[in-house]
Image (cartoon, rainbow, N blue to C red):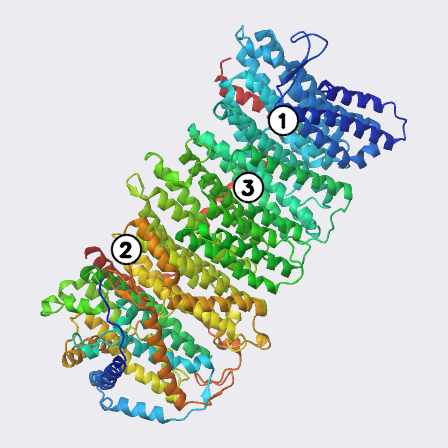
């Protein structure tokens, strides 16, 4: 094996060699530089191969003498990985910088080589003085390379960087001198081995560490670095973040390992401060590269915190820190390179990427990598981090990390959302080399994801069939949408058939709704022509998440599936025309909920990396209530329980026509499934004297009631349906929280019923929207004759939903009454009872204001909804009627199964009739009697009035005048005005104000903190010094 | 558990017989109450057979007008709702031929089937395009949500009390004299339910719902001739059917037709008496009234039972 010293030698040699290339032969110089970088990379790759094969780390001595008499380099697996990463970033970065490098000539190329050499050296060296030397080289090379940018601000930024770099160097140098004084050695291994001999060793180590921390550009002492990110050439910024940042973190990690656990709190504290502060500041950023700069600061802060937690993470530190660091390197480099393709610097300018879908994929992947979403390394890293932190009682650290991640998600998804929705006439650069570099980063990110999945010892998300199936749609994107739709439907049904034997009846209910249920909704997607880019991969990712959720047997599998379905549904929701802010609040609430799950699972695991879901029932009673609370919060975010609901109306209402039923009819059930798992494993829990299951019942009842009241006051048909979902999920939650056989049966019946009628209503309203181009009900009216099928499905939908016999909603009500008669939980019932008739109000409004009343002039020519939109609706109509007459088809099996769970059999099935302790229900009898009466009465009327002609629209008389304008005759706007006058106070947006207040406080904080960054170099220098002084004061409390 | 008797074809004839009795009773009784109300106001009032006259006249009228399918079906829904409510509940306790189709469901069926006719009628009237229909529906539904709430709570309370949702069993539990009636054994539930009863009988002070129909040409806007005949038939049947439910739940039911006639009449008089001496509430006033007075009684009823 070639000595790792060659990495340095090749870099240095190449830099000198460039001097020999004749002036004017830039191409030759460039080739030489690439050759040198390539050779360095080859050596590094060779070492990586060796180390990955399990070889022991190698100590390389120079000058033929052992340390401390000569410099020593150390190469083990971490070094090999990081040097390779940095050099790959360097090689690709050189390609990205090629224009600027060729313009400036061989000098600039030599500087780049020196930078790469110095970064490699920083990683490899075990000598603190060498650290200083390499930092100096990096500092100078950075200042030089910043000048490659055509941006005039780059000069000032480079200068400021040099000035502050010198301050840091002085600190570092003094630290080194003191350390040498204290330990008598400069080699890290020697420092670790020798006890400090003199007083002041603490200060020495402090200076050393703080200088290295400042090298990471921590918040708030980082204005100087941000200016570089913003003004430098993006190719260099990529290197600056992915290369310099990575190397500096590793240098710090080496010293921190030597410094010992006493310094861990300092590192953790500074790391978290940086992670949170940068996240906060980034919320208000409008410049893409500066935003990326903040993100880099934050990510490096996170790694710093992980290093600080090394004492509890132990062996896992490398896996966790490495996962975050490498994902960050790939993502950040990728994003900077991507920014080179985007013409403008505003966040909305990234809309140009939409013209090249592969770049959108890259953009989305990079963001997911940074946030730590599956299947990327950060995801596994965060999981293990959470487990370890919780196991050692470091909840505040975990809380900060998760909150910081949420901030990061907030600004990154805000950016992504804007890019997906903003208008842009610009076209991204189509340069094949620049594109290839971005795609290389993309491939690296996915590859790392697969690798980390394999290394994690947990289940690898990327090897599951549903996820692979979803990812295959990325490759299938060029196909016509209809073909993809067929494949998607076959996939869902096929997976269901495949897994069918393994589902217990309870899972089966959810599986039916999620898989074949999803397939039925996809029938409506046949209305979409063209290729429908960007629809199928996220849609199938969402379904993959749901499929995996049902299969999950461990907490990790469950969580991974949860994140997948969240991510997929976010991208789906974002597709809606005006859905940007709603998709944003959806992803934030969902991730917040997911983090609650993560914390809950970690708490339950108590250090075990992964826990079987059925082992949740065995966790100690002292922590079980807390686990319950965390998990319940996570699941209730998904079911949009009152208080956590504000994302739902917008997200469901603004999604595309066929997406609304997916996210409403299907996706909400994931939350219910979670609550089923939660209750069946954890059972009743009490926290501080409060019965948590009863608490859920209260929340469910409140959601059922307030959701219904809010639905009554909506003018937008899809919003009305969305609020109604909140209400319906409240019912289901209430049913589950009754924690009885019938309560659960009720909830499961709701799962099916809600899927059927809500999907149907969303499709019907979507079909109307497609024809009328409005969702505001008062702008419609009288559509019954033009859209009879849509009317019919809405009619069946509202009859079913309101619980009026004979349709299936009544069965739900019947079971509901039987369930509540056995409970002691009476007060929340009041709200549930209120919610029932209120539901009737909004349903009537839905059908009346759209289909009845007066037809408007602009709608006289419209046609029935598209055929494929009607097909699923008619299937639902058939199912609703079928389910009404023969509820036993499914319910009976579930009933039997619940009997084994709860150990009772409250229902007796005789033929097609059901009876309970309290009453009886004969669905077939009800249906026949009603049909009999209806037909008889109808026959009487028909005998008398037949052949009646339909009169003209305005053939009505009222108030002594003949109306002639539909707008003034159609009573629709503010339909329930009296109701509003009576109970309108319930409409007060308490939750919206609460969450809005938190959001405003954060952005105001960001705005305030932003003022620290004035662009003044002197101020920046002062900030660095103050930062060090404050850290010193905190650590030493004023005594040295 | 209650084993339910199955269906026999003869029940259809029995049901028709019950229907015939109730229809005639309803036509006469509602006319009588109207007459009483008129006398209170110092008017002479309608002849007792006026309802028959109206019904025959309207049914005989020819119509060639329709506003559409839902409009046509509105009265069918309406009348089916009334007949259905009547027939899903046993009319006379212990009288085998007056048990109707109660094998199909229990009290919950009756409670929810009330909405069947309302919904169909509202849809039919809606299709006429007449704004007053929509205004009436809006008012009616708004008021109903609040008015029905005490009933729902009362039903819960007595279902817990008697440990059944089966109407004959509830009636059976009240046999043996007035002291066994729910009125006495569970006065809170009864009072709560009576809030709902008075609130939904379309009499003052809760009858502003009807106002949009009064402005133009006749009761339910735009309906005429045979359409209206069906609805008038329902006006005779539905209040009786509803009163039967209340009678069964709270007032010991009826074990013969005479008791039935007296109890229904007495109950029907309650809203009528309240109605003649009260002005109208606006809808929001009604809603607040029920939330302020009806709801607390209902809540007390479910808490103490």
Query: Tag 3, which chain?
Result: A
Q: CA distance from mark 3 to mark 1?
A: 22 Å
What's the residue at 55%, 67% (across, down)? A869
Q: Earlier in the sequence, mark 1 or mark 2?
A: 1
Q: Residues within 10 Å of mark 3 (few under 14, many from 20)?
A: many
Q: Is residue A55 above or below residue A902?
A: above
What's the residue at 58%, 32% (across, down)? A323
Q: Earlier in the sequence, mark 3 or mark 2?
A: 3
Residue A770 placement (x, y as % from top left): 58, 67
Q: Is residue B196 left or right of residue A702?
A: left
Residue A340 placement (x, y as % from top left): 73, 41
Residue B170 placement (x, y as % from top left): 18, 67
Q: Residues within 10 Å of mark 2 (few under 14, many from 20)?
A: some
Q: CA distance from mark 3 to mark 2?
A: 40 Å
Kindly identify which residue carries mark 3: A461
Q: Quadrant of the N terminus of chain A?
A: top right
Kindly identify which residue carries mark 2: A905
Q: Are marks 3 and 1 on the same chain?
A: yes
Kindly identify which residue carries mark 1: A52
Q: Are marks 1 and 2 in contact (CB under 8 Å)?
A: no
Q: Are marks 3 and 2 on the same chain?
A: yes
Query: Tag 1, which chain?
Result: A
Numbered mark located on residue B111 in the image: none
* Mark 1 residue element: helix
Using the rendered view, name the quadrant where residue A167 is placed.
Answer: top right
Q: Is residue A166 above or below residue A597?
A: above
Q: Is residue B18 left or right of residue A933?
A: left
Of A549 and A251, which appears nearest the observer? Answer: A549
């Amino acid at each position: 094996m070639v000595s790792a010293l060659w990495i340095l030698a090749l870099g240095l040699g190449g830099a000198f060699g460039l001097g020999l290339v004749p002036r004017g032969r830039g191409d030759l110089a460039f080739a030489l530089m690439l050759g040198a970088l390539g050779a360095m990379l080859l050596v590094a790759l060779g070492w990586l191969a060796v180390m990955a094969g399990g070889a022991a780390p190698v100590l390389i001595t120079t000058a033929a003498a052992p340390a401390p008499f000569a410099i020593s380099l150390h190469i083990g697996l971490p070094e090999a990985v990081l040097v390779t990463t940095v050099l790959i970033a360097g090689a690709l970065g050189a390609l990205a910088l090629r224009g600027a490098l060729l313009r400036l000539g061989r000098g600039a190329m030599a500087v780049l080589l020196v930078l790469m050499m110095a970064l490699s050296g920083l990683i490899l060296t075990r000598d603190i003085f060498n650290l200083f030397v390499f930092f100096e080289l990096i500092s100078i090379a950075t200042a030089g390379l910043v000048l490659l940018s055509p941006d005039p601000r780059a000069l000032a930024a480079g200068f400021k960087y040099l000035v502050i770099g010198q301050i840091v160097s002085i600190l570092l140098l003094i630290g080194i001198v003191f350390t040498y004084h204290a330990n008598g050695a400069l080699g890290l291994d020697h420092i670790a081995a020798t006890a400090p001999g003199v007083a002041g060793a603490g200060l020495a180590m402090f200076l050393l560490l703080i200088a290295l921390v400042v090298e990471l550009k921590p918040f708030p002492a980082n204005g100087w670095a941000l200016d570089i990110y913003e003004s430098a050439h993006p190719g260099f910024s990529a290197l600056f973040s992915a290369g310099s940042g990575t190397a500096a973190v590793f240098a710090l990690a080496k010293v921190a390992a030597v410094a010992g656990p006493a310094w861990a709190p300092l590192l953790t504290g500074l790391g978290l401060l940086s992670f949170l502060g940068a996240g906060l500041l980034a919320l208000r950023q409008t410049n893409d590269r500066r935003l990326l700069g903040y993100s880099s600061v934050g990510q490096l802060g996170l790694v710093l915190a992980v290093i600080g937690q090394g004492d509890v993470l132990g062996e896992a530190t490398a896996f966790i820190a490495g996962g975050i660091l490498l994902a960050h390197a790939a993502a950040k480099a990728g994003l900077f390179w991507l920014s080179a393709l985007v013409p403008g610097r505003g966040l909305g300018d990234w809309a140009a990427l939409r013209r090249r879908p592969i770049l959108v994929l890259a953009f989305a992947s990079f963001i997911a990598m940074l946030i730590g979403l599956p299947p990327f390394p950060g995801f596994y890293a965060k999981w293990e981090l959470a487990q370890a932190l919780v196991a050692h009682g470091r909840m505040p650290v975990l809380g900060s990390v998760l909150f910081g991640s949420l901030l990061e998600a907030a600004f990154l998804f805000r950016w992504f959302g804007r890019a997906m929705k903003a208008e842009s006439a610009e076209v991204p650069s189509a340069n094949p080399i620049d594109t290839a570099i971005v795609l290389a980063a993309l491939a690296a990110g996915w590859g790392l994801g697969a690798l980390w999945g394999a290394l994690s010892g947990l289940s690898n998300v990327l090897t599951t069939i549903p996820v692979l199936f979803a990812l295959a749609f990325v490759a299938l994107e060029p196909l016509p949408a209809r073909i993809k739709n067929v494949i998607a439907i076959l996939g869902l049904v096929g997976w269901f058939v495949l897994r069918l034997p393994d589902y217990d009846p309870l899972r089966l209910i959810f599986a039916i709704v999620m898989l074949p249920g999803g397939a039925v909704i996809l029938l409506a997607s046949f209305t979409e022509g063209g290729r429908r880019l960007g629809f199928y991969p996220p849609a199938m990712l969402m379904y993959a998440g749901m499929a995996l959720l049902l299969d999950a047997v461990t907490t990790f599998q469950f969580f991974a599936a949860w994140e997948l379905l969240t991510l997929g549904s976010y991208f789906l929701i974002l597709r809606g025309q005006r859905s940007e802010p709603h998709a944003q609040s959806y992803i934030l609430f969902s991730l917040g909920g997911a983090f609650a799950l993560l914390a809950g699972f970690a708490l339950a695991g108590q250090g075990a990396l992964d826990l079987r879901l059925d082992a949740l029932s065995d966790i100690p009673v002292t922590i079980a209530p807390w686990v319950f609370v965390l998990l319940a919060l996570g699941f209730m975010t998904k079911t949009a329980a009152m208080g956590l609901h504000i994302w739902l109306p917008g997200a469901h209402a603004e999604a595309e026509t066929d997406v609304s039923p997916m996210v409403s009819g299907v996706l909400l059930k994931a939350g219910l499934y979670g609550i089923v798992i939660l209750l069946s494993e954890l059972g009743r829990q009490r926290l501080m004297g409060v019965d948590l299951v009863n608490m859920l019942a209260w929340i469910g009842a409140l959601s059922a009631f307030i959701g219904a009241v809010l639905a009554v006051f909506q003018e937008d048909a899809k919003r009305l349906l969305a609020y109604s979902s909140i209400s319906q999920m409240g019912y289901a939650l209430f049913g589950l929280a009754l924690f009885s056989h019938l309560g659960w049966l009720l909830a499961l019946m709701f799962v099916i019923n809600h899927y059927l009628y809500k999907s149907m209503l969303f499709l019907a309203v979507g079909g109307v929207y497609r024809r009328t181009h409005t969702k505001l009900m008062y702008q419609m009216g009288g559509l019954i004759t033009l859209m009879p099928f849509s009317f019919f499905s809405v009619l069946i939908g509202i009859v079913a939903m309101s619980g009026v016999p004979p349709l299936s909603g009544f069965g739900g009500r019947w079971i509901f009454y039987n369930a509540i008669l056995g409970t002691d939980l009476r007060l929340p019932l009041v709200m549930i009872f209120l919610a029932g008739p209120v539901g009737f109000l909004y349903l009537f409004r839905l059908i009346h204001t759209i289909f009845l009343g007066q037809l408007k002039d602009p709608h006289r020519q419209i046609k029935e909804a598209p055929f494929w939109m009607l097909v699923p609706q008619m299937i639902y109509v058939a199912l609703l009627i079928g389910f009404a007459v023969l509820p036993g088809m499914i319910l009976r099996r579930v009933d039997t199964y619940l009997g084994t769970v709860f150990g009772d059999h409250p229902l007796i099935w005789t033929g097609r009739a059901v009876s309970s302790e309290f009453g009886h229900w004969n669905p077939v009898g009800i249906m026949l009697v009603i049909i009999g009466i209806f037909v008889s009465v109808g026959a009487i009327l028909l005998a008398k009035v037949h052949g009646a002609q339909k009169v003209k629209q305005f053939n009505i008389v009222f108030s002594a005048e003949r109306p002639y304008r539909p707008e003034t005759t159609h009573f629709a706007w503010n339909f329930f005005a009296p109701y509003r006058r009576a109970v309108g106070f319930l409409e007060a947006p308490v939750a919206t104000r609460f969450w809005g207040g938190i959001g405003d406080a954060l952005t105001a904080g960001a705005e305030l903190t932003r003022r620290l960054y004035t662009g003044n170099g002197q101020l920046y220098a002062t900030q660095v010094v103050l930062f060090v002084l404050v850290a010193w004061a905190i650590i030493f409390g004023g005594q040295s | 558990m209650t084993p339910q008797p199955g269906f026999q074809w003869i029940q259809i004839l029995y049901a028709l017989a019950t229907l015939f009795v109730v229809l005639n009773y309803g036509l006469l009784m509602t006319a009588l109450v109207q007459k009483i109300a008129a006398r209170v106001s110092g008017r002479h009032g309608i002849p007792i057979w006026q309802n028959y006259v109206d019904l025959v006249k309207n049914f005989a009228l020819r119509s060639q007008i329709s506003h559409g399918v839902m409009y046509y079906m509105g009265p069918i829904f309406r009348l089916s709702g009334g007949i259905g409510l009547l027939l899903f509940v046993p009319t006379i306790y212990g009288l085998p031929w007056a048990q109707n189709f109660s094998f199909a469901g229990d009290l919950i069926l009756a409670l929810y089937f009330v909405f069947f006719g309302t919904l169909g009628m509202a849809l039919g009237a809606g299709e006429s395009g007449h704004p007053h229909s929509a205004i009436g529906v809006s008012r009616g539904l708004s008021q109903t949500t609040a008015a029905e709430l005490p009933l729902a709570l009362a039903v819960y309370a007595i279902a817990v009390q008697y440990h059944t949702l089966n109407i004959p069993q509830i009636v059976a539990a009240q046999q043996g004299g007035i002291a066994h009636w729910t009125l006495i054994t569970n006065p809170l539930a009864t009072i709560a339910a009576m809030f709902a009863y008075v609130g939904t009988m379309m009499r003052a002070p809760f009858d502003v719902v009807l106002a949009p129909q009064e402005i133009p040409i006749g009761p339910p806007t735009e309906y005429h001739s045979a359409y209206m005949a069906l609805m008038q038939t329902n006006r005779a049947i539905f209040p009786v059917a509803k009163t039967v439910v209340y009678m069964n739940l709270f007032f010991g039911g009826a074990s013969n037709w005479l008791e039935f006639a007296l109890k229904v009449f007495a109950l029907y008089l309650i809203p009528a008496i309240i109605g003649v001496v009260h002005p109208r509430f606006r809808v929001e006033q009604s809603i607040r009234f029920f939330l302020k007075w009806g709801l607390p009684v209902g809540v007390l009823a479910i808490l103490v039972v």
